[in-house]
Amino acid sequence: MTWQATVLTLFPTMFPGPLGQSLSGRALKNGVWSCQVEDLRLYGLGAHRSVDDTPFGGGAGMVMRPDVVDAALKTVSVKDEISRIYLTPRGRPLTQQDIQHYATGAGVLLLCGRFEGVDERVLEAYNLEQVSIGDYVLSGGEIAAFVLLDACVRLLPGVMGCEKSSVEESFAQGLLEYPHYTRPAQWKGQWVPEVLRSGNHEAIAAWRQAQAEKVTQIRRPDLWSAWIERNKNEPISMCKSA
Ligand code: ADE
């Protein structure tokens, strides 16, 4: 069954954009996923197909009109069970867990805002999930949509060559991933850690676990605290500091 992405945007020609390349592009061609793009401008009002207006209460910028967004949302045909998402810096932070949830569902509908955002009433009327890809402000939701879609599509069955790698990668276990090395074994005087060349799979797994814990502790104290909390009843080696 095809995983269905529907994108509502004022810039429809941006899609599928980078997602038409590489693994996601091949999966799109093969029907693993579909990308339906709806031009919000088509629902604009008057001769100029206006989609926005000044904010009540004053202030800078323009706000996308609820009637325009409503007309677009009413028209697009999507399965009932898909997740309906509005991309906004005001949203809850997107996590790998969300991605796994979306990727195992039927698909997503993504509303991309521009200007100062979308009138709150239409977001509430459609009960859209409000999601942010990070604590910075983009000029619109389109690039955030690429991020969300790319992260989902690579998890769809058959898209990534090696299914096991999505279980081991960063965030999948709540930790950042261990470092990677390849040939040459010695480069600019630096050796690949000996344990990785030892052929001892148990020792390699233990080294990687320790490295994952160490890097998470240094770079992401938030993830590290959550990991400690989740593993506090595990044997001591699972969460000792590496
Ligand atoms: N639109 C603008 N900035 C955004 C962000 N950080 N996340 C999601 N959508 C956005």
Image (cartoon, helix red, strand yellow):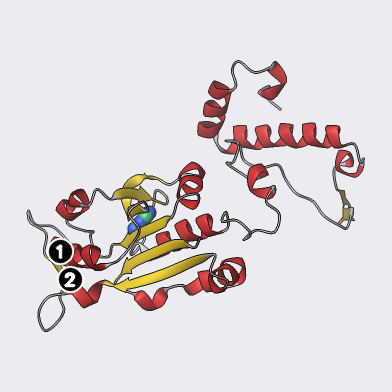
Place of residue 70 in the rendered image (x, y in percent of width and height, measured from the top left): 18, 62
- Is ligand 1 closer than 8 angstroms to the Cβ of mark 1? no
Q: Quadrant of ligand 1?
A: bottom left
Place of residue 118 in the rendered image (x, y in percent of width and height, measured from the top left): 21, 58
Q: Residue at x 63, y 59 (%)?
A: 158
Q: Between residues 217 and 188, which one lies in front from this camera angle?
A: 217
Q: Residue at x 28, y 62 (%)?
A: 113
Q: Between residues 217 and 75, which one lies in front from this camera angle?
A: 75
Residue found at the very far bottom of the displayed protein: 47
Q: Quadrant of residue 22?
A: bottom right
The kind of residue tagged 1 is: Arg
The CA distance from mark 2 to mark 1 is: 6 Å
User: Is residue 62 in view from this perspective?
Assistant: no
Left-right relation of 228 to 94: right
Q: What residue sits right under mark 1 in the picture?
A: 65
User: Does the CB distance between marks 2 and 1 fall below 8 Å?
Assistant: yes
- Is ligand 1 closer than 8 angstroms to the Cβ of mark 2? no
Q: Residue at x 53, y 33 (%)?
A: 223
Image quadrant occupied by the C terminus: top right
Q: Residue at x 56, y 56 (%)?
A: 156
Identify the mark at residue 51; answer none if there is no mark. Answer: 2
Q: Is residue 66 above or below residue 167?
A: below
Residue found at the very far front of the displayed protein: 1
Q: Residues within 10 Å of mark 1 (few under 14, many from 20)?
A: many
The kind of residue tagged 2 is: Val
Place of residue 176 in the rendered image (x, y in percent of width and height, measured from the top left): 62, 40
Residue at disc 1, secondary structure: loop
Q: Is residue 45 above or below residue 95?
A: below
